[in-house]
Image: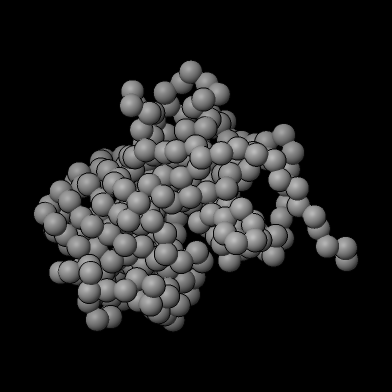
Amino acid sequence: MHGCGNDFVIIDCRANVIQLSNEEIQLLCNRRIGIGCDQLVFINSKKTKNTTAHLSFWNTDGSSSDTCGNATRCVASLLFEETSKSELYLETNHTKIMCKRDVNANISVNMGKPRIGWSEIPLSKKIDTLYLPFDGRPTASNFGNPHCSFFVNDIEEYTIETFGPNIENNKLFPEKTNVQIVEVIDRGNIVMRVWERGSGVTLASGSSSCAAVDSGIRRNLLDNIVNVKVDGGELLVEKKDDGVWLTGPTKHVFSGIFTMIRKKP
């Protein structure tokens, strides 16, 4: 499945618990010798009441991620097909997420409120998270993952493929970080490119969209409802009293069965 080109391999583990090694996760995510995706997602049995399932996320390098907005939207779309409900809750290692489906089958998820304290992101030292001490003075935040948002005059002047990994691995971010390059068109529209921690360039990112918009609001560059244009399409981000909402389309590309042939010890 994908949300605006941000694509996922989703495995339903509710009936059978599956454990994969770091090497096996990398293989599945590899676009040449595996299935290929931006992230691997497990749908696990729920751990708390009033939720439908527990989600876990894995980057292409085999590392784990606490949340993913577009993946959550994709899973919610699948689970809505199992029920007549128009609302449900999914849980992650980060939080419990409310999901809604509208009459046009767009899926909205409440990504919650950002963490903006230096130790919550986390950063390696106590500094102002609104203006980090890099060229461009980016803003840091955490929507389940660390994010660093650069606001630029012309997005075409930046090459995310080289710019992104340099920031991701900067020593200021002990857990590394997602990187967003953002051009503000007006107070309700931005263009954004993304480098995802542990995965690289992606056509879209839900949590990055939320981080970019929330950071722009903090800097008084944006209003509370913003259309986010990414390489793979458009997403809508709305900052409300109960959290930051992410809305957009999802697409079920194919379903199948795979067999993992494990190496003998």
- Residue 97 percent across, percent down from the top left: 45, 40
Q: Nearer the viewer, residue 111 or 36?
A: 36
When asked about the image quadrant of residue 151, the answer is bottom left
Farthest left residue?
A: 186
* Residue 132 vertical position relative to residue 245 in the rendered view, above or below: below
Identify the residue at image location x=20%, y=55%: 190
- Residue 10 percent across, percent down from the top left: 58, 44
* Residue 17 vertical position relative to residue 179 in the rendered view, above or below: above
Q: Nearer the viewer, residue 92 or 259?
A: 259
- Residue 259 percent across, percent down from the top left: 75, 48
Farthest right residue?
A: 265
Identify the residue at image location x=47%, y=33%: 77
- Residue 67 percent across, percent down from the top left: 48, 52
Q: In the rendered view, how is the structure colored?
A: one colour
* Residue 12 vertical position relative to residue 143 in the rendered view, above or below: above
Q: Nearer the viewer, residue 166 or 219?
A: 166
In this view of the protein, can residue 123 be seen by the observer?
Answer: no
* 64 left or right of 21 in image: left
Question: Is the C terminus in the top left, top right, bottom left or bottom right quadrant?
Answer: bottom right
When asked about the image quadrant of residue 231, the answer is bottom left
When asked about the image quadrant of residue 245, the answer is top left
